Image (cartoon, rainbow, N blue to C red):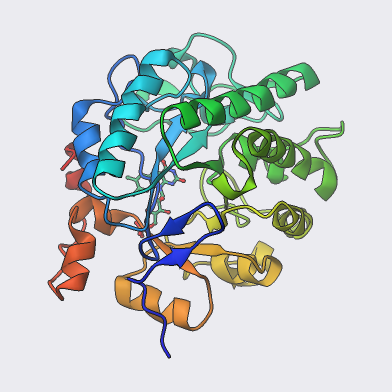
């Protein structure tokens, strides 16, 4: 019998989803100048509460985590109260929501916080901040082991704040070339201490953050997003695969809520992953709940889930274009195609 994506899915003993369609994390740069969610954001998320799980746009865990204008935070009481309004509205509409915890590492810019840009190694990214092209990226300061301890503690604190703000769980943003991912790829990690050079060392920061977050919210409310193939703010290295071959079973042992590939197009194949796509590589190394993402329609996702390529689907851009995506699918109505101009407004 074929799997119906619109029927409930039990993530674990703590969380049951009303369907298998997740809202992918989507940065919108619409928080106020104190990085507090606005009423427009409350309404935007509340309109999408009929998905199985909303994953919030990436939320910065502390001031030096910021690399883009007006990205929301989760480190002041005002920000926590702002998110509480969002989660209350989502819950009132019958939905569930995870917070995506974010530190951009070397993709940060001092313009936003006036301090050092932190990263595993002093290797900068080329180019400038999107939407603020006058801000050229700087060479980051390699983190000390004390800096690392502070970062791990701040991820845990943000997870605690997420609980206070009423989120149902957290997704650790370990993808897309940001801080955690910088440790996981040779292009950004040239450390010669216990955080570099070997798969075990390069996975250490990701696992320390995971364990610290689990300590606060529990494994059933902790999820991870990864991009084993470097494609964004980072270049591929054939040694990267071994890092993820080590990391995936370690994550699986921790019995997370789910693992999530973070990619724009899952048909993209990576030389560094022996020609596999993101979901193929993750499925081969991780047998527990996997979320697929990246240019899927409801129909192609249904096929992939029925072919056992992953268990749940995250939908991004179509949910920007169609706040009523789920009801359109249920009623067999046409879905409006996404276009970049839609980013100008929260609908
Ligand atoms: C994204 N994506 C993204 N990913 C992430 O992990 N955190 C984020 O905050 C964002 N922000 C974001 C903003 C915008 C405008 C886009 C288009 C994408 C990536 C996103 O979660 C997803 O992986 C891709 O959009 C691919 O899925 P779709 O859109 O093809 O369904």
Residue at (17% x, 45% y) in the render: 341
For the N terminus, the image quarter is bottom left
- Residue 342 coordinates in the image, percent (x, y): 18, 46
Q: Is residue 246 visible?
A: yes
Residue 136 occupies quadrant: top left
Q: Is residue 132 visible?
A: no
Instruction: In the rendered view, tell whether residue 283 sits above or below residue 24.
Output: below
Instruction: In the rendered view, tell whether residue 111 sits above or below residue 187.
Output: above
Residue at (67% x, 62% y) in the render: 272
Q: Residue furthest front?
A: 13
For the C terminus, the image quarter is top left
Residue at (63% x, 65% y) in the render: 288
Q: Residue furthest top?
A: 114
- Residue 13 coordinates in the image, percent (x, y): 56, 56
Q: Nearer the viewer, residue 184 or 274?
A: 184
Q: Residue furthest bottom?
A: 1
Residue 133 occupies quadrant: top left
Residue at (36% x, 73% y) in the render: 5
Q: Nearer the viewer, residue 142 or 337?
A: 337
- Residue 21 coordinates in the image, percent (x, y): 36, 63
- Residue 2 coordinates in the image, percent (x, y): 41, 87
Horizontally, is 298 left or right of 174 in the view? Answer: left
Residue 271 occupies quadrant: bottom right
């Amino acid at each position: 019998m074929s799997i119906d994506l619109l029927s409930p899915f039990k993530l674990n003993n703590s969380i049951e989803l009303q369907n298998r369609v997740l809202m992918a994390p989507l940065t919108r740069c619409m928080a106020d100048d104190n990085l507090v969610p606005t009423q427009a954001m409350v309404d935007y998320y509340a309109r999408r509460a009929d998905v199985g799980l909303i994953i919030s746009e990436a939320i910065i865990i502390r001031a030096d985590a910021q690399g883009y204008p007006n990205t929301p935070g989760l480190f002041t009481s005002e920000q926590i109260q702002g998110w509480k309004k969002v989660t209350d509205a989502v819950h009132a509409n019958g939905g569930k929501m995870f917070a995506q915890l974010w530190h951009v590492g070397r993709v940060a810019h001092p313009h936003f916080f006036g301090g050092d840009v932190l990263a595993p190694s002093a290797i900068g990214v080329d180019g400038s901040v999107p939407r603020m092209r006058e801000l050229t990226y700087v060479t980051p300061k390699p983190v000390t082991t004390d800096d690392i301890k502070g970062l791990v503690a701040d991820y845990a604190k943000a997870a605690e704040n997420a609980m206070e703000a009423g989120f149902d769980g957290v997704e650790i943003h370990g993808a897309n070339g940001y801080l955690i991912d910088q440790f996981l790829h040779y292009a950004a990690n040239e450390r010669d201490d216990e955080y570099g050079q070997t798969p075990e060392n390069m996975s250490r920061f990701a696992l320390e953050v995971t364990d610290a977050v689990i300590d606060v919210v529990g494994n059933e409310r902790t999820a991870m997003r990864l991009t084993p193939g470097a494609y964004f703010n980072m270049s591929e290295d054939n040694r990267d695969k071994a890092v993820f071959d080590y990391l995936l079973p370690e994550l699986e042992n921790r019995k997370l809520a789910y693992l999530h590939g973070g990619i724009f197009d899952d048909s993209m194949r990576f030389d560094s992953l022996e020609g596999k796509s993101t979901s193929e590589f993750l499925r081969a190394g991780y047998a527990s709940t996997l979320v697929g993402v990246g240019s899927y329609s409801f129909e192609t996702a249904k096929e992939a889930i029925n072919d056992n390529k992953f268990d749940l689907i995250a939908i991004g851009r179509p949910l920007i274009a169609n706040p009523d995506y789920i009801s359109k699918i249920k009623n067999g109505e046409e879905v409006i195609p996404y276009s970049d101009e839609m980013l100008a407004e929260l609908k």
